[in-house]
Amino acid sequence: MVAQIIDGTRIAAQIREQLSFRISGLKVSGVTPGLAVILVGNDPASESYVRGKGRAAEELGIYSRQINLPETISEDELIRQVDYLNADPKIHGILVQSPLPSHLDENKVILRIDPAKDVDGFHPMNVGKMLIGVPGLLPATPHGIQELLLRTGNDPGGKHVVVVGRSNLVGKPVAAILVQKAKGANATVTICHSRTADLAKHTMQADILIAAMGKPRFITADMVKEGAVVIDVGVTREEDPLAKKGYRLVGDVDFEAVSRKAKAITPVPGGVGPMTVAMLMVNTVSAAEEQTHRNQSKRV
Ligand code: GUN
């Protein structure tokens, strides 16, 4: 079998185009959605992700503000910056790029973000809503994975989804989203991780396999069922002197071999990555709509 390549770049463009109508609607009522991204330090990969988010926002007519803070910033000062953005009516969405330097407690910072502006969906209030199936801001990468599946005719309903990786960023939330009793979900979900015994026994059972552990080319063809749908969330930079940038991006899946066995597969780059950015834009617009609605109700 030769796999269909799931084109995340094209699907993300589709989502942004649909979103532009909602942005126009907000602008008619005098509101420009605003996104603030806090970047601490100079990690090149984080810098590149943050640039991508800012560019996507500007292209859509979303007001974008990037706040660069030094690696040595104190937790108190970082929290002051969050408070400042919480109080700024021009900002509807706040994102603190992770990972943070080790002297900063990421959970403490996330807890400080106004849940209504938490466009990453990382605040416990939003995580709780996701878990119990109440509408709220969903984390961008897991939500993007669900959209990729649905928009390529791979509804997870009744399917066995095997997630490899248990991070708060991807593994746990994607499992929570896909297991919901809801349209576009209803999957049977298994979560595997570094302590799982006989990992291949589990991955071989997957109708939909989601690789999110950050280990380049870890999922090999012998771990995948013939005809499975494979979603590769891994992005590792590997040195490559022949590449223009001096590195290339490698996923968690051995793409060459697995694409000969899978029914459909996401490439790296161009699969899940662009969806993360698109869903962040969706959350920013949803947050702006919700805050606008709330303010209008207050005035009545
Ligand atoms: N680092 C890698 N992915 C993400 C993300 O989706 N949000 C934030 N805040 N940091 C990240």
Image: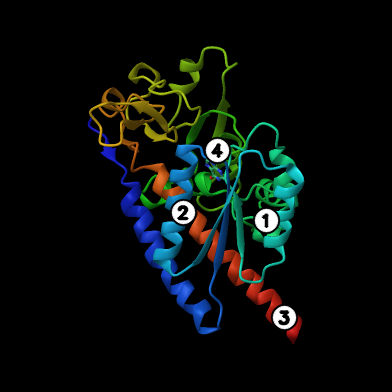
Nearer the observer: mark 2 or 1; the answer is: 2
Mark nearer the N terminus (3 vs 2): 2
Q: Is residue 124 visible?
A: no
Please, is residue 253 above or below residue 291 in the view? above
Gap between marks 3 and 2 measured at Cα? 31 Å
Give how far across and how far down residue 34 sits, in percent.
Answer: 56, 66
- Which residue is at the front of the view, 257 or 288? 288
Image-quadrant location for residue 58: bottom left
Residue at left offset 40%, top offset 62%: 16
Gap between marks 4 and 2 measured at Cα? 18 Å
Provide the residue designation for mark 1. Answer: 134
Residue type at mark 1 is Val
Mark nearer the N terminus (2 vs 1): 2
The 10 Å Cα crowd at callout 4, few under 14, some 14 to 19, many 20 or more, is: many
Task: Kindly check if marks 1 and 3 are in contact, taking CB atoms under 8 A apart as contact.
Answer: no
Q: Which mark is residue 53?
A: 2
Task: Kindly check if marks 3 and 2 are in contact, taking CB atoms under 8 A apart as contact.
Answer: no
Please, is residue 242 above or below residue 153 in the view? above
